[in-house]
Each structure stands twice: as structure tokens, then as C-alpha cells.
């Protein structure tokens, strides 16, 4: 299966994609919008995209893209995010004065960077891309913050492992496919929905009341502005369901109170990966 990701090979998205679909052929894209478009137009069979991080929060752009493209979430996975200081072979930590990585990764390693004030952080478009760049530069004074997989993929060296501030750092990834190709797993017990309501008192409560009446657990709710319509919003929710019938009932309960309802996917809920020992 050809799977699109945003970012370079060796990224966390690459790692998540291989975990979801063994033997997948990874097709990197610089922009998330291009990865979604590749799925929608049939250039690739699927894409794996991060949707939220346990520390940094949601990837807002990806909610917007899920709404505007004819795609469905087929599966999800949770990936432990472990950041490493990576350099070319032979470089030492004392030589490093510039560190490149994605802005979120830099933010998640603030304590390490504060403890090494001679290392100036620079934002880059991708964690794995920053490793690719340093290997091309062959500069002993440059390092990157990225995954162990990225270091292996580009033949770089880990100077220090596990430099993130908080070890409880997980990212949730979606496997998305064209709506016509998406298959609902028999064990699916979670749905993601997008909906909008009238700007009037009690409209949101009325839209969600059906979940409470059915005993459905709401695990996430988030709002995003509607582009081109100031102060109008789309709400995104995740719900746990116990049966296919309950899925249908949940949608039917929303329709009378919403101007728009879109099911983004129905899939098995992912569990936290087993803890792995540090490799310091």
C-alpha cells in the first residue's frame, strides 16, 4: 500500500505508518494539504497524519482538511514520541552550537536546550528533514532533534537520547483513505464527527444531549472557525460506541439540531503502547 505522509522519510509519521500497515511504501509530501490531495485523487491508497499530541494539543490544520476532503478515518494509533539529539558521526555534544527541528519538537525539549545555552535552536519544517539536512551539510557543529528511526535512516549518530521534557509524550495518528475505499473494522468502537449548529442559546447542548441520552461517552470536543464566516464554528467530537446500531442512533440524534453533520470515521480505539526502557 502506498501511504502518504507529511514530512520526510524517517519521521514520526513514517514510524506510525509502518506500524499501521506493515510493508507500506511511504510517499513523503512537504505539505499536509498535498498528502490529503494525493489520497483524494487516488495517487496513493492512504495517508497517515498526526491529529493530536498529548502535550502540544491538536493539529488544527488536519481537522480542517478532514472536513474539506472526501476521506474517512479507517484506523488510529498512538505513538510514544521520544526526542533525541542527533549529529553526524564523529561529532561531540560539546561541538554543537546550532540545533534544528520542527517547532513543536524544539518546544518539547526546552529544558535540555536551556541546560545547553550555547546551542541555538532553529525551527525547521520537519524533524526527520532536519536530520537529512545535517547529513547533507556534514557540519560537526549542527545537530537535529528527531527520532531514533530518523538517525538510522540517514546514517546519523545519537548524541543524547530521550531529551524531551516530559516522557508522557504521545501523538495520535489517523490512517485515512478515500471515503469510497474506507472499510469499517468489525471491532470499531469509536467515531469522529464534525458538525455545526445555529448561533443561538442552547443549540450546542441540544446537539450533544442525544449522546447523554444514549449513554455514549464523549472523549473529545473541539471547535474550529469556519473559513470566510467570522464567528461561525465547526465542532469536532470523538465518541466511544458499543455497537453499530449505537453509531446510527448517535448520528440520528444530532441531525435535528445541526445544520451540518459529517462522520469523519468509525474505527477501533487505540490503546497506549507498552512502556519501553530508556536507552540512555
Image: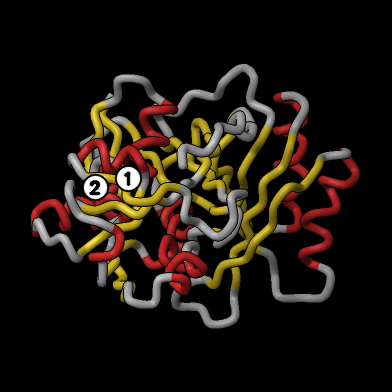
**Front-most of 227 and 21?**
21
Would you name the residue on which mark 1 appears? 11
Up the image or down, 273 lies above or below 33; here it is above
Looking at the picture, how far across and down is residue 274, in whole percent?
A: 61, 29
* Location of residue 37 in the rendering, given as x and y in whole percent from the top left corner: 28, 48
Q: Is residue 115 visible?
A: yes
Give the residue displayed 77% in from the left and 47% down from the top: 218
The residue lying toward the viewer, choosing from 93 and 45, is 93
- Apparent side of residue 217 relative to residue 63 in the rendered image (left or right): right
Q: Which residue is at a point 20% across and 54% down the rendered structure image?
A: 91
CA distance separating discs 1 and 2? 6 Å
Disc sitting over residue 111 in the figure:
none
- Badge 2 local density, few (<14 within 10 Å), some, or many (20+)? many
Secondary element at image label 1: loop
Q: Is residue 33 above or below residue 226?
A: above
Which corner quadrant holds the N terminus?
top left
Give coordinates of residue 280: x percent, y percent: 46, 42
Q: Position of residue 209 (x, y in %)?
A: 85, 53
Q: Secondary structure at mark 2?
A: loop
Q: Does any portion of residue 30 appear in the rendered image?
A: no
Q: Is residue 272 left or right of residue 102?
A: right
User: Does the residue at mark 1 contact the one at mark 2 (Cβ under 8 Å)?
Assistant: yes
Mark 1 surroundings within 10 Å by alpha-carbon count, few (fewer than 14), some (14 through 19), many (20 or more): many
- The answer to whether 154 appears left or right of 215 in the picture is left
Q: Residue at x 35, y 41 (%)?
A: 148
Looking at the rendering, which quadrant does residue 260 occupy? bottom right
Q: Which residue: 23% across, 53% down?
A: 87
* Residue with the mark numbered 2: 8
- Residue 44's quadrant in the figure? top left
Amino acid at each position: 500500500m502506498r501511504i502518504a505522509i507529511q514530512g520526510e522519510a524517517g519521521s514520526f509519521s513514517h514510524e506510525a505508518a509502518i506500524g499501521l500497515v506493515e510493508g507500506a511504501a511511504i510517499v513523503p509530501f512537504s505539505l499536509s494539504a498535498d498528502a490529503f490531495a494525493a489520497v483524494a485523487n487516488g495517487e496513493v491508497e492512504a495517508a497517515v497524519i498526526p491529529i493530536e499530541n498529548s502535550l502540544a494539543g491538536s493539529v488544527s490544520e488536519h481537522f480542517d482538511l478532514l472536513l474539506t476532503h472526501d476521506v474517512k478515518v479507517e484506523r488510529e494509533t498512538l505513538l510514544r514520541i521520544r526526542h533525541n539529539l542527533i549529529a553526524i558521526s564523529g561529532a561531540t555534544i560539546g561541538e554543537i552550537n546550532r540545533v534544528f527541528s520542527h517547532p513543536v519538537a524544539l518546544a518539547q525539549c526546552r529544558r535540555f536546550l536551556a541546560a545547553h545555552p550555547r546551542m541555538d535552536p532553529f525551527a525547521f519544517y520537519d524533524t526527520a528533514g532536519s536530520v537529512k539536512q545535517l547529513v547533507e551539510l556534514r557540519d560537526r557543529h549542527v545537530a537535529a532533534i528527531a527520532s531514533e528511526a530518523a538517525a538510522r535512516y540517514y546514517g546519523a549518530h545519537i548524541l543524547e537520547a530521550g531529551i524531551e521534557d516530559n516522557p508522557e509524550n504521545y501523538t495520535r495518528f489517523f490512517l485515512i483513505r478515500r471515503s469510497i475505499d474506507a472499510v469499517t473494522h468489525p471491532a470499531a468502537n469509536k467515531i469522529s464527527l464534525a458538525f455545526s449548529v445555529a448561533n443561538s442559546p442552547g443549540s450546542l447542548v441540544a446537539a450533544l444531549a442525544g449522546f447523554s441520552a444514549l449513554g455514549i461517552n464523549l472523549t473529545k470536543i473541539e471547535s474550529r472557525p469556519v473559513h470566510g464566516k467570522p464567528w461561525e464554528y465547526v465542532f469536532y467530537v470523538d465518541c466511544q460506541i458499543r455497537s453499530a446500531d449505537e453509531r446510527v442512533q448517535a448520528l440520528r440524534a444530532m441531525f435535528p439540531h445541526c445544520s451540518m453533520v459529517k462522520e469523519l470515521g468509525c474505527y477501533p480505539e487505540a490503546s497506549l503502547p507498552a512502556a519501553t526502557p530508556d536507552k540512555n
